[in-house]
Image (tube, helix red, strand yellow):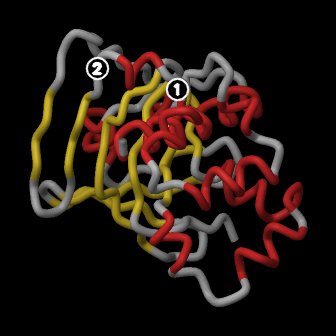
Amino acid sequence: MRRATLVGLAGAALLLSASACGSSSSPAATTTTTSAATTTSATTPAMTTTTAMGTAAAKDIVDTAVGAGDFKTLATALTAAGLVDTLKGPGPFTVFAPTDAAFAKLPAGTLDTLLKDPKGDLSAILTYHVVPGKVMAADVVKLNGQTVKTVQGTPLTVHVDGAKVSLKDATGKTVNVVKTDIAASNGVIHVLDGVLLPK
């Protein structure tokens, strides 16, 4: 169930990316195709990689994320910002999806303030979590030290340390990727333990 939610969020983020930016030729936008008949799981203390198959891959990013159950805050924010339809689109998208626990780490009152102006800062933050194209974990680990352009426009910096992958946002804060390669019909979701901020 958690896998499905993550995939839904990633798809939604990817969809936002594709509709906002069109296609991209950056290394992060490289499309990787994974066979729907294959399921691969590898667990390390830093990160879990899962390639979903069957019904999970048949759902778009939004439905996958909602089905996972750990992305209620993200789903609420996407709905408020009017981004659900975009992320249900064809994509492909890569969504770096913060969990409910990640949103809970924001300073008190921050989320409520963002929800009051969903087309402003909230939309910018959400689209900052989406990269155009389907970027699988195997692609991300090759990007150590490189920047990746987001749908929002501000780049993220990728850091790889063994099995641990983290992203540094525009404020200099580092967020860890804790689960990867949650497949959706229109992209992929990678789960984060924090919320990235574009400014």
User: Does 21 sit above or below residue 162?
Assistant: above
Residue 133 shows which numbered tag?
A: 1
| Frontmost residue, 111 versus 68 | 68
Quadrant showing the N terminus: top left
Which residue is the site of mark 2? 53
The percent coordinates of residue 170 (x first, y second) are: 59, 68
In the rendered structure, the answer to whether residue 95 lies left or right of residue 175 reads right
Nearer to us of marks 1 and 2 is 2
Q: Tag 2: residue type? A: Met
User: Does 178 sit above or below residue 6?
Assistant: below
Residue 199 shows which numbered tag?
A: none
The percent coordinates of residue 168 (x first, y second) are: 46, 66
| Frontmost residue, 91 versus 69 | 69
Q: How dense is the environment of label 2, judged by Cα within 10 Å: few (below 14), some, or many (20 and up)?
A: some
Lower sequence index among marks 1 and 2:
2
Indicate the quadrant where residue 4 lies. Answer: top left
For the point 49% across and 59% down, the residue is: 98
Q: Spatial distance from mark 1 to mark 2, Cα to Cα?
A: 19 Å
